[in-house]
Structure formats: C-alpha cells, structure tokens
Amino acid sequence: MKKYVLKTDENGNEITVADVHKVLLEMLKMIDGICRKYNIPYFLNGGSALGAVRHQGFIPWDDDADIAMLYEDYKRFIVALKQDLPEGYTFQCFDTDKRYNPLIPGMKIRKKGTYLKEVNTLLANRCTECDGIFIDVFVYDYCSASKTMDLPLRMLNQLIMPFIILFDNLGMNPLFLKRWFVSNARMYGKLNEGSKKIGFDLTWTFKSPLKPFIFDYDDIYPVQYVPFEDTQLPIAHHPHEYLCTAIAPSYMTLPPEEEQKPKHIVDIRL
C-alpha cells in the first residue's frame, strides 16, 4: 500500500496518514461507545462514509474523519460528553465556548497531547487550550423541500458569514453575529420540525444556498452498522442515495492518482 507522508522531522522520523488513521480509529471507537451507551444515533459523514462503502475503512489518503447527527441528538451528545468523555480528550463547540467559530463544523472532539494545524487561513482555532488531532461533528437538522421556505434564512446566514470571518481575523469575537447566525439555524430547524427532509443545518454555509445538501430522512435513518477497518461503524440507511448527493453519483470511481493525496493538514504531532 502506498505511504502518504504528512511530515518528516529533523531525525528523519515520518508521520503518515496511516499513523493518523490509527488515532482517528481509536477516537471513533470511543465516540461510538458513548453514543451506544446513550442511544444517540449518528453516522459517518461525507468522505468518511465514502471510505466505509468503497474501502471498508478510511480512504487511504484521507487525513480526517467526520461524523454527523441531528441537532436534537447533538444536544444530548453534549450532555453525554460532559459525563463520559475520557480524560485524554476534550471537545469544543459554540454551545459551551463562545470563542468557538460556528462557521466550522458544529463540534470538534480533540485528543489531548497531540497537535494538528489545518489548511485553513481564515478560520483559526480560537479555543487554544487544545489544538489536538480531531474528529469533526457536523450538525444536521430538518429542512424544507420548498425553495420559498428554504432560501431566505439560508441566504441570510450566507450574508452574515463574511462579517464573522472579518471580525474574527481582526482579533475580535463577533458574539452578536455568531448568536444571530446560530439562532437563524435553530429557528429554521424548528420551523421544519417533522419534515421528511434533512441536511446540514444553516451554520454550514460553505455550499451554494441554491444547491444545498438535502436528503430524504428515510435515506439516512435508521442508520446501519457496516465494517470499518477492524470494527463496525454506522452509515446512512441507504448509502447509495446518500453518497450520490453528498459526494457524486460516480462515488465508486477512484479520483486520478495525482488527486489521491492528503489535503487538510499543514503540521502535526502525535
């Protein structure tokens, strides 16, 4: 198997994507244990779901891991983490730390004693107590299939986004804008509660508001456990339908070899 080197230190010691996968797998197993204990449904998101289906584990060159859950389950997940997260880990989210930038995924679960610098020049980690290797937790919520209902609040958050980035990069914490941004997302989910459509909540604005990721509820729930490396982890109930939207209809086709490379990490220490 090809070796994807992320870093070589002054002594010639290498850190590879495979080394990162070992840490991420350990973290995923820990998260799965907590979610099972508290009956919190979640699923592998995006490239991690693709890895489960196409590779029965991590995509060999993928250097991160993502999970997702509905907002109603995310609230319970925060409570569960406060009670059961092992000592060697921490979690960061806007709900518990107002320095956190809600433009990035809803939560990061980090491993203490490690270090990771992302390829991200505009959205730095402001929760500086821990810059460890992490798993992203994306928040999904109920959505409307109607553009008339969907577009106004989605566009509003799209307009607020650059101002949050601007003030954040000026060294300010735009708390009013952050709260407004998050409350719009919560209101939108509440308005559509019970809908048969779900997708990324409105805090995820890095997708055209005209073509958001929206899925049929029944294509994701109930989740199913499938082989993932040496364990089993949950993915969408209908993975083909999910991946056609989240990735592309051609998701089983490998990208060109020149595109098979890690892309999220600038610096790392395990």
Image: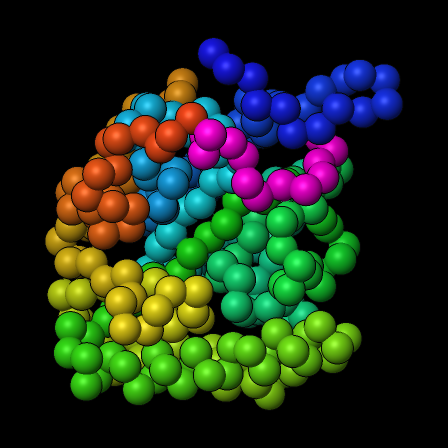
Of residues 102 and 158, which is closer to you in this image? 158
Place residue 128 in its image quadrant.
Answer: bottom right
Of residues 252 and 154, which is closer to you in this image? 252
Q: Answer with left or right where residue 64 lies relative to residue 44.
A: right
**Looking at the image, residue 184 lies above or below residue 169:** below
**Placement of the C terminus among the 4 image quadrants:** top right
Relative image position of residue 197 (x, y in whole percent)? 18, 65
Of residues 156 and 253, which is closer to you in this image? 253
Q: Residue at x 38, y 30 (%)?
A: 256
Q: Is residue 180 at least partly visible in the picture?
A: yes
Place residue 189 in its image quadrant.
Answer: bottom left
Q: Is residue 96 at least partly visible in the picture?
A: no
The colour scheme of the drawn protein is rainbow
Q: Is residue 262 magenta?
A: yes
**Looking at the image, residue 62 lies above or below residue 41:** above
**Looking at the image, residue 138 lies above or below residue 1:** below
Q: Residue at x 75, y 77 (%)?
A: 170
Q: Answer with left or right where residue 171 lies relative to residue 16.
A: right
Of residues 97 and 211, which is closer to you in this image? 211
Place residue 251 in its image quadrant.
Answer: top left
Relative image position of residue 194 (x, y in whole percent)? 17, 71
Looking at the image, which residue sits at the far right?
10
Q: Residue at x 50, y 50 (%)?
A: 136
Q: Answer with left or right where residue 195 lies relative to residue 40.
A: left
Relative image position of residue 229 (x, y in whole percent)? 40, 21
Q: Residue at x 52, y 77 (%)?
A: 161
Magenta stretch, residue numbers: 258-270
Q: Is residue 236 magenta?
A: no
Relative image position of residue 173 (x, y in whole percent)? 70, 79
